[in-house]
Amino acid sequence: MSDTGADTKRKTKTVPKVEKPRLYKVILVNDDYTPREFVLVVLKAVFRMSEDQGYKVMITAHQKGSCVVAVYTRDIAETKAKEAVDLAKEIGFPLMFRTEPEE
């Protein structure tokens, strides 16, 4: 055995596996009490939708009972949904948004 001074041990490099965060849908739930104009105001203010986008989402929710507004990471989805519901509560409307995982 010769002693060359070289390190013969292999060094392994560990690379952490980073997963993309799970996405959540924000869903507008239709009700028979909140005026359409107010729903549009909320969609524009909270979700930064244009007048046309907001109208399409609102009409879809009205016709089908609910409609996906946007898809975000969990924290953002829950924050946006809460912000929209709180805005409606301030005015006295029962407007409802919910979040659920995207499949």
Image: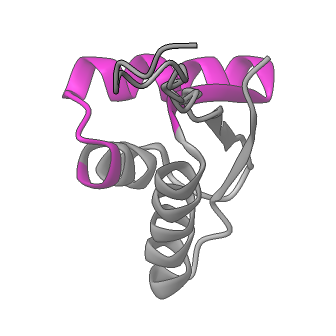
Q: Locate residue 63, reporting x and y percent.
A: 71, 18
**30 on left or right of 8:** right
**Residue 101 occupies quadrant:** top right
Q: Residue at x 58, y 27 (%)?
A: 17
Membership of 77 in magenta stretch = no
Q: Which residues are magenta?
A: 45-72
Q: Residue at x 58, y 13 (%)?
A: 1
Residue 33, placed above or below residue 85: above
Q: Locate residue 5, reporting x and y percent.
A: 34, 27
Q: Locate residue 66, reporting x and y percent.
A: 74, 30
Return the residue nearer the eye: 37 or 18. 18
Q: Locate residue 40, reporting x and y percent.
A: 36, 42
Membership of 55 in magenta stretch = yes
**96 on left or right of 88:** right
| Main SS class of the magenta portion in the image | helix
Q: Residue at x 36, y 29 (%)?
A: 54
**Residue 75 occupies quadrant:** bottom right
Image quarter hosting the C terminus: top right
Q: Residue at x 46, y 57 (%)?
A: 80
Return the residue nearer the eye: 23 or 1. 1
Residue 2, placed above or below residue 77: above
Return the residue nearer the eye: 67 or 10. 10
